[in-house]
Amino acid sequence: MGDLSKRFYAIKNDREFRYLYKKGECCPSYGFICYFRQNNRRRDRCGIVTGKKLGNAVTRNRARRVIREAFRVFDNELCGETDRRFDFVFVAREATADMKSDKVLGTMRVKLKPMLLRTGGKGSAHGKNAGGNDRGPKKNNEVPADSDN
């Protein structure tokens, strides 16, 4: 099959989807929303969600195929640039079914790749602040206003 062989596994367990929604970093775009988190496995894993609001079964299956094909190419590019592996969940939007896989791939390159290359650092996937969340200071770390007096 050559250079573009399948290197990722599908995420099928509901618990893993919910974990990525809760703990993963979010990357919204026009065609999809991607949740991702670094894992400690040898391969990337990918899950694709298409809700009924997207359309009938044909439309939902097309959206899945477009995302899957774009991710297959994107994953091979990513494997060449970093040794870290990630879990991904892609949530298809209404525009996904009308897009070509090249356009979805371009969106992954522009929006997702910079986030992945800066994410995680040297730590493990389960370390503190893994995933590079920049959501501001936590409430228990804030300094009280009258602490200088």
Image (cartoon, rainbow, N blue to C red):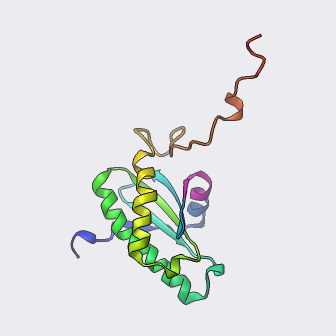
Picture quadrant where residue 15 is located = bottom right
Q: In this image, 27 relative to 141: left or right?
A: left
The picture places residue 117, in percent across and down from the top left corner, at 39, 49
Q: In this image, 140 relative to 3: left or right?
A: right
**Is the residue 10 above or below the residue 123 in the image?**
below
- At a point 32% along the width and 50% down the height, the residue shown is 83
Taking the magenta stretch, the answer to whether it contains residue 44 is no
**Is the residue 19 above or below the residue 46 in the image?**
above
Tell me if residue 39 can be seen: no
- At a point 37% along the width and 59% down the height, the residue shown is 43
Magenta segment range? 19-27
The picture places residue 97, in percent across and down from the top left corner, at 52, 81
Residue closest to the eye, 63 or 37? 63
Picture quadrant where residue 67 is located = bottom left
**Is the residue 22 above or below the residue 72 in the image?**
above
- At a point 44% along the width and 65% down the height, the residue shown is 107
Question: Which corner quadrant holds the N terminus?
Answer: bottom left
Question: Which corner quadrant holds the C terminus?
Answer: top right
The picture places residue 48, in percent across and down from the top left corner, at 52, 71
Q: Name the outermost residue toward the top.
A: 149
Q: How many marks?
A: 0
The picture places residue 7, in percent across and down from the top left corner, at 33, 66
Tell me if residue 1 can be seen: yes
